[in-house]
Image (spheres, rainbow, N blue to C red):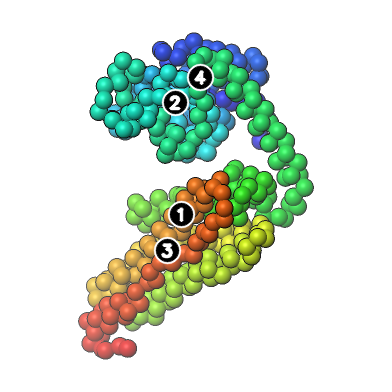
Amino acid sequence: MTRRPPTIMVSSTFYDLRQIRTDLGRFIREELGYTPLLSELPTFPVEPDVDAIENCTRRVTNDADILILVVGGRYGSTEEKTAKSITNLEYLAAREMRLPIFAFIDRSILPLVALHRKNPTADFSQFVDDPRVLSFIDEIRSTHKIWTHEFTSAQDIIDTMRVQLSHMMRDGLLTLKQFSDIPVQSRISRLHGVALKTALTKPLAWEYLLFAYALRDRISTHSDLRKDYEMELLLGVFENVRNEDFIKWSETRLDEVLNQVYCIEKLINSELKVAFGPPGQAGDVDLIIFVAERLGIVYQKALEWAQQVKCTSVEDPFKPVIQVLATYSATIITCIETYPQRILDAVLPNVNQPGSRTVEIKLSFDPPDVENFRRVMRLAAKDAFGLEIE
C-alpha cells in the first residue's frame, strides 16, 4: 500500500458556506499537511462520464478517509431520484464506508430541529431555505446518533478538529502498538475497521459488538453472490436430473439445507455462549471471531445452494418439488443477514445505561417444512411413476 497523507472531505452546501470551506481547506492543507477534498478545488478528481452528484459520492467512497460535515441553513441541490441533497448523499456514502464523520451544525439552526419535529408543517422559511435541512439534522442526531458540534465560524470547526484529530492520532498509536503484539496466526489479524478496533480496545459489551461487527464484515464479502441471488442471475453449472434420479438428488439437497440449519443452531446457541464466557468473565476473542467466520461460511453455502437448486432442470412432474426446495435457503440467508443489526440494536442503546443488562442472542427461525416437501414429493412421484412413496 502506498503511503500518503490522510484525505479529509468537506461536505456542505457551497454558496452560504463558501468562506468556511475556504478556511477549512487551508487548515487541512497548510496546518495539518493533509489532503483537502473540496469540490471547488482544481485538485478535486472529476470523472467526465458521470454527473456532479455521482462524482461527489464517488469521491467519498474512493478517496476520503475522514468526512467533515457542515450543515447550515441551506439544503442544497438535490438528486431527482431520491430527492436528497448532495450533502445528504455524501454523508450517507460516508456512513456506508464507515468513515469517521465529524458533524457541525450552525448554532442558530440547531434549536429549530426540536420545534420542527413537533410541528413539521410550521413555517421556518425565515431561518432555512428548505425544512428538509431540519429533517436531515434530526436524522443525523436522533436516528443515526452521530455526535454533533455547534459552530458559528470556521474557527469553531478548526479548534474542534484539532482536538478530535489529536485523539484519533493517539488512538491510532495505541492500536498500532496493540496490533504489533498480535501473532500473525491470530484471528484478530484478519479483522479490519470497527471490528478490529473493538477486538483491541474491548469497550463495554465488546463480546457482543465484536461478534456483530465481525459477522457483518463476513457477510459483506459475499455481496456479489448475494446480488446474483437477489437478481436471480443463474451463473452456476446447470444440471439435468432424470426422473429416476430425482428422488435421491432432492433428498441430498434437503439433507444439505438441514445441515446448514444444524450448523447455525449449534454455532449460535452453543458455541457462541462458550465464546462469550460466563457472566462477569471476559470472552474468548479468537472463538468469537471463529463463530462469526463459520456463520459467514454457512451464509455463503446457503447462497450457493440456492444457485445449485435453481440451476437444476427436471421434468414437469418434479418442478413443484424444485420450487419448494428453492424457498428453503431464503430463511437462512435472511436470518444471518439481519442478525448483526439485531444484536447492535439490542446492545448499543444499553451500553451507557446504569445497571446490568441481559442480552438475548439466541437465533431461532422456522426450519424447512420437511412435511410439505414430503407431501409435494409424493404427489410428484405418483404423477411421474404412478407410485406411492413413503
Does 323 sit left or right of 353 as displayed? left
**Residue at position x 66%, y 19% from top?**
33
Residue at the spot of label 3: 332
Going from N to C along the chain, the mark reached first, 2 or 3, is 2
Residue at the spot of label 1: 342
* Disc 1 from disc 2: Cα separation: 32 Å
Of the residues shown, which amino acid type is indicated by label 1?
A: Arg
Q: Disc 3 vs disc 1: which is toward the camera?
A: 1
Of the residues shown, which amino acid type is indicated by label 4?
A: Phe
Of the residues shown, which amino acid type is indicated by label 3?
A: Ile
Where is the N terminus found, in terms of image quarters? top right
Q: Disc 2 vs disc 4: which is toward the camera?
A: 4
Q: Is residue 291 above or below residue 69?
A: below
- The disc at residue 151 is 4
Furthest residue toward front: 355
Q: Rate crowding at label 4 as few (under 14), some (14 to 19) or many (20 or more) other CA atoms within 10 Å.
A: many
Q: Look at the image and tell me whether residue 50 can be seen.
A: no
Q: Secondary structure at mark 4?
A: strand
* Coordinates of residue 389 in the picture (x, y in percent): 30, 88
Q: Secondary structure at mark 2?
A: helix
* Disc 2 from disc 4: Cα separation: 24 Å
* Coordinates of residue 245 in the picture (x, y in percent): 36, 80
**Residue at position x 32%, y 88% from top?**
390
Residue at the spot of label 2: 56
For residue 14, what is the image quadrant? top left
* Coordinates of residue 125 in the picture (x, y in percent): 29, 18
